[in-house]
Amino acid sequence: MTAILYPVAPDAAAALGGPLGRAAREREASRLAGGERVSFVTQGVGPEYAAREAALDAHAGRVEDDRPGRTLTLPPEDRFCRLVELAAPVRGRRRLPAPLAPSFQDGRRWPEAPAAPVATVWRLQVSYWRVGDGPDLSDAPQARQQRKAGEADRDTLKALTRQPLRAVRPQQPLDIGLFEVRRPEAPHSVMPDE
């Protein structure tokens, strides 16, 4: 399986226009950035489009297109861009619809859906290795622990949630096979389980 080659750049616009190079792993990205620290980020870039078709036309060749007659499938290493559907801004700012409260009336738990659906827009998101200053999260505790302790601000917690998952402790090698069990009378030996 081919890995995605993410651009190495200082910002999202440079990732699309002229990256320093492309790398699948952090070590390779750091080498392309001249030894500087890099962090993996996903950012929206460019204008918002009212229709998916308009966004696909504007970003032809960057994202996969599944429309009849215009089908485009990108190679696995070039899939660092994607179109996302977002709630449309309301009066100059983004506001999500209020959550529905359970009603428990007439034998139904939830109320009827609103008559008018939420207006949405489409925007291009780029995943890339950002060069430069960013919070160093390599030795930071898990986001859940920092949030409970109240130690971190909003931006640090957001950056923590976007990092790859880390094990709580290193995985130990398996000392017995899948179809083997330890003998109760001799736990130091293993026997096949049928």
Image (cartoon, rainbow, N blue to C red):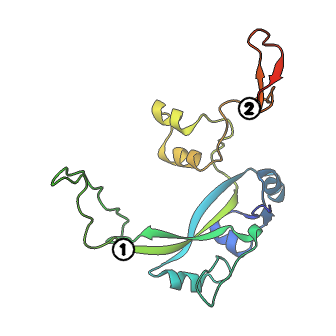
In the displayed structure image, the side of residue 116 where residue 126 appears, left or right: right
Q: How crowded is mark 1: few (under 14 residues within 10 Å), some or many (20 or more)?
A: few
Residue under the image location 59 percent in, 88 percent down: 68
Residue under the image location 72 percent in, 75 percent down: 74
Mark 1 lies on a secondary structure that is: loop
Question: On screen, 165 above or below 23?
Answer: above
Picture quadrant where residue 50 is located: bottom left
Q: Residues within 10 Å of mark 2 (few under 14, many from 20)?
A: few
Disc marking residue 102: none
Residue under the image location 68 percent in, 70 percent down: 14
What is the three-letter code of the residue carrying label 2?
A: Gln
Which residue in the rendered view is the most extreme toward the front?
194
Label pair 2/1, CB-CB below 8 angstroms: no
Picture quadrant where residue 165 is located: top right
Residue under the image location 65 percent in, 63 percent down: 127
Question: On screen, 36 above or below 78?
Answer: above
Q: N-terminal of the two: label 2 or label 1?
A: 1
- Image quarter where the N terminus lies is bottom right
Relative image position of residue 90 (x, y in whole percent) = 33, 70
What is the three-letter code of the residue carrying label 1?
A: Ala
Mark 2 lies on a secondary structure that is: loop
Disc marking residue 171: 2
Of residues 4 and 91, the one drawn nearer to the viewer in this rendering:
4
| Residue 133 seen in this snapshot | yes
Which residue in the rendered view is the most extreme toward the left?
106
Compute the Cα span from label 2 to label 1: 46 Å
Disc marking residue 119: 1
Relative image position of residue 60 (x, y in whole percent) = 64, 84
| Residue 150 seen in this snapshot | no
- Image quarter where the C terminus lies is top right
In the displayed structure image, the side of residue 38 where residue 60 appears, left or right: left
Relative image position of residue 24 (x, y in whole percent) = 78, 58
